[in-house]
Image: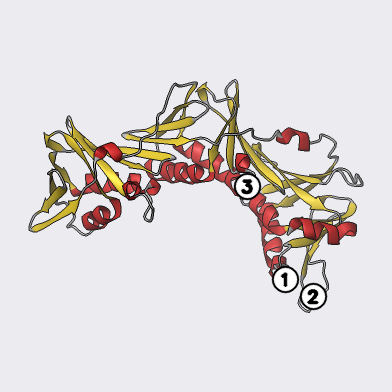
Amino acid sequence: MQFSIERFELLHALNTVKGVVKAKTTFPILSHVLLVANGDGITAHGSNLDEMTSCSAGADVTKHGGVCVPMFILHQAVQKLADGCKIDMKSTKDVLHVEAGRTKFHLSVLPTKDFPRIDKGRNDYDFTTNSSTLCGVLTSVRAAQSTEETRPAIRGVNLSGQESLLKFVAINGAGAHTSKSEMSGKLPQNVTITTETVSEIIRLCKSIGGDVHVVGNEAVITLNFENISFSSKLIDGDFPDYHQFIKDSHDTKINVDRMTLIGAVDRVSTFAQDGDNLLRFDFDGDNLTISNEKEYEHGGNETLVIDGGGNFSFGFNFRRILDLLNATENRDVVLSFKAGDEQNNLCHVTFSDDKSFFGFVVNYKISERKQQVSEAA
């Protein structure tokens, strides 16, 4: 393999694929990048067995071929070269020789046959969306992804389509975030992407932009950007039906400014970070008082003016509330309850100017505080 390439082109390709490459691994090949030269350019491939990213770049190819080289050593070396320089690469059986002006270095290589690839299989779904749209909906639900090792089926975001509407859902033991968006094409019916894949897709959408073409099946999902392809294995298992937790009987609705509520919860939570993370919410007509319910040596409370009302009290995990409130930049938040119903312990969270988002969080009855604290911990 032999080719010449501009530093910017090579650095861009390495920056794109390094998100899935492992810096420390018991399998040396997983810390390597596969460089393939053919036609009028090269393609860099990074893989970690579960995810694979490929990025094409223009180059003057003299001899076709491929080579696996240490990702982070090559990336660091290319970073330190002068801007605008041209890099010449030539591989022999066991070594990649690199030359840029007066700088020369060489890297040991591994066989290309050892590089792990992902079998993409058939395409059961095929749709196109904008990077900013995809990034936005994933960002709005990602905070609710479960971290429970014993329930791998919910350690990610579920995608389910109906006609032209694609719904994104993340759920955990204390609540859920859902968001939906219009998409063009054939949508997936029920696939779940991992937390790592969610993070990588958001990173790629932010750095690349433009349209993204999504294809896949029940085992693998692939996102194709311009000159870039990202594939990931999907979570195997049934995603829970979160609709069973949602009831239409929430007749008590509270309207409050989102940023005002975030500020109050954040300030009072300073005195509640003792393991259970619970705050007390006392609703009294047009007032909401947020406090730490235990009698501490230190404590705090804050009262807000709200639109709506009722006279009832609940305990909330402040971290879950903040996750929901930070899921969007919309101004007004609507909290919906079924006050007085001891069997209905969910607070629905929506936004008056964003009908695409819906979330819910467990609200704990103050009278059963001791029991709920142990469950929350």
- Amino acid type, callout 1: Phe
Residues marked 2 and 3 touching at CB (< 8 Å): no
Label 3: how many Cα within 10 Å (few below 14, some 14–19, many 20+): many
Q: Which mark is residue 271?
A: 1
Q: Which of the two residues, 260 or 31, is positioned nearer the viewer here?
A: 31
The N terminus sits in image quarter: top left
Height in image: 195 above or below 80? above
Q: Is 18 situated left or right of 107 in this image? A: right
Q: Which of the two residues, 329 or 240, is positioned nearer the viewer here?
A: 240
Q: CA distance from mark 1 to mark 2?
A: 8 Å
Does label 2 or label 3 sit earlier along the sequence? 3
What residue would you read off at disc 2?
Answer: 296
- Amino acid type, callout 3: Ser
The C terminus sits in image quarter: bottom right
Q: Nearer the viewer, mark 2 or mark 3?
A: 3
Residue 167 position in % (x across, y down): 61, 32
Does label 1 or label 2 sit earlier along the sequence? 1
